[in-house]
Image (tube, rainbow, N blue to C red):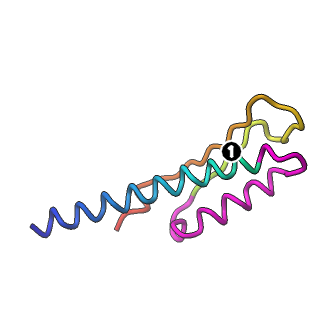
């Protein structure tokens, strides 16, 4: 019974981490489309959004294109995380 209980807790924690990562990438992409923002501004916003879960987790942020253009049809923000670091 305890094994099932702790497995459920770990599953809930995994989903929480996954949702925070997804939301952080979304907020970073929103910041990237604002004219005048730089990649460092976007990374700062992502760092602030990832703060609640990123205590012991290492992650990398990739923004394509590397220099934010004024007019672009596509800006991609990717956050790579080893999710196994987020468990109990």
Left or right of 37 on screen, residue 53: left
| Residue shown at 23% from the left, 61% from the top | 7
| Residue shown at 52% from the left, 63% from the top | 57
- Please identify the residue farthest to the left as the structure is shown: 1
Secondary structure beneath label 1: strand
* Quadrant where the C terminus is found in the figure: bottom left
| Residue shown at 39% from the left, 55% from the top | 15
Residue 80 placement (x, y as % from top left):
56, 48
Residue 87 placement (x, y as % from top left):
37, 63
Task: Pick the residue in front: 5 or 66.
Answer: 5
| Badge 1 density bin: few <14, some 14–19, many ≥20, Cα 10 Å | some
Asked if 13 appears above or below 33 in the picture, the reply is below
- Residue stretch in magenta: 32-58
Q: Which residue is mark 1?
A: 62
Q: Any magenta on residue 9?
A: no
Left or right of 37 on screen, residue 45: left
Residue 76 placement (x, y as % from top left):
69, 37
Left or right of 71 on screen, residue 63: left
């Amino acid at each position: 019974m305890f094994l099932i209980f702790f497995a459920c807790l770990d599953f809930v924690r995994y989903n929480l981490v996954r949702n925070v990562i997804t939301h952080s990438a979304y907020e970073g992409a929103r910041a990237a489309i604002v004219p005048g923002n730089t990649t460092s501004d976007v990374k700062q916003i992502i760092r602030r959004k990832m703060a609640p879960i990123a205590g012991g987790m290492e992650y990398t942020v990739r923004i394509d294109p590397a220099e934010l253009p004024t007019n672009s049809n596509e800006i991609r923000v990717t956050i790579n995380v080893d999710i196994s670091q987020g468990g109990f």
